[in-house]
Amino acid sequence: MGDIAKGVLGGGWALVVGWVLPTALNLAVFFLAVAPSLRRTRAIERVWPDTASQTALLLLCASVLFGFVLNALQTPLYRILEGYLLWPRRVFDWGCRRQRARKEAIAALIAHPNGRTLVQRALLNEHLARYPVHGDQLAPTRLGNAIRRFEEYGHNRFCLDTQVLWNELSATAPVQARRQVDTARTSVDFFVSLLYGHVVVAALALLALTSAGAERTLLSVAGIMLIALVPLWYRSAVYATDEWASAVRAMVNLGRKPLADALGLVLPQQLSEERVMWLLVTRMSRRPYRDAADTAFAPYRAAPPDPHCSLHPPVPGPGA
């Protein structure tokens, strides 16, 4: 039981909280509000459980199954909300212009406080911090920009592209830093999964309105409430990225030295030289090898151990 608990509290905990739990909540709403109307159709009535215990077992199994499926599909699900997938070119450009105007408006309010309190200015700075530093990195959605800001952190500060070297950085960073990143992302996963589930259940509720003998009042209220909650979950996901961004920043700051050691490199004392070194590492990972890399990496390569050096100190003689 101890090993099972450790597994659940480890990597499995993020899966349960981030994807299985919100799926169970959405399925519970479906079972309570939508399923009673669908059960009146012959096709659904034949396969629907007869007892409450069977229904609970179905809910549990379906929650785990759909939670695993959503976890496997998390990359395209995120990219849709970030504005990278299934967005027409014109809509993408319009979204980028809108986000750029919003960023400039927040920056203007910060530059001209006009009697705003310290708390109000701090909130404006929080909103501005959810955008990437460089304007060419802007995404067409708020969630896309909130995630993009910490995706570019390593490259902006150290020329360390975390998108390319994420696996290497994760493998060498301190355990606590990796755990913080996983825990912080779980909150964002929870709201993203809840959002998509609400959309699906709301669509099924509207579809069930067309069935014979449907409980139209219940279905209409459920559908409207679920659709109304979608913007709330989206905004909550955007706010939850603040902790995720802090965890990634800590992972980059604390993991650079272990990563350099693992790659057989010596971290330069000058920040400008360190930026050059990480730029070379990124290029080495993304591009085919060239002979010029041998000369470029020479100043940063750690000296190999001397094969003539004894592994053990000399034993002092009798007269020592």
Image: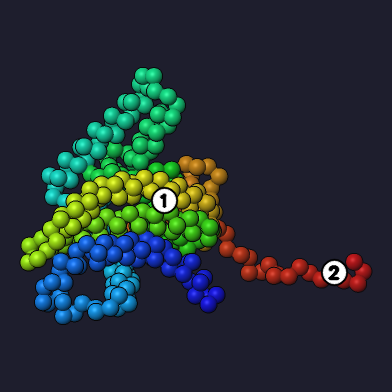
The reply, left or right, for residue 50 in relation to residue 247 is left
Q: Residue at x 39, y 37 (%)?
A: 126
Front residue of 215 and 305: 215
Asked if the residue under mark 1 is in contact with the one under mark 2, i.e. CB atoms within 8 Å, the reply is no
Rendered location of residue 288, percent (x, y)? 33, 61
Residue under label 2: 316
What quarter of the picture does the C terminus occupy? bottom right
Q: CA–CA distance between discs 2 and 1? A: 56 Å
The reply, left or right, for residue 65 in relation to residue 115 is left
Q: Which colour scheme appears in the figure?
A: rainbow
The amino acid type, in three-letter code, at marker 1 is: Trp
Residue under label 1: 244
The amino acid type, in three-letter code, at marker 2 is: Pro
Mark positioned earlier in the residue sequence (2 or 1): 1
Viewer can see residue 239: yes
Image quadrant of residue 142? top left
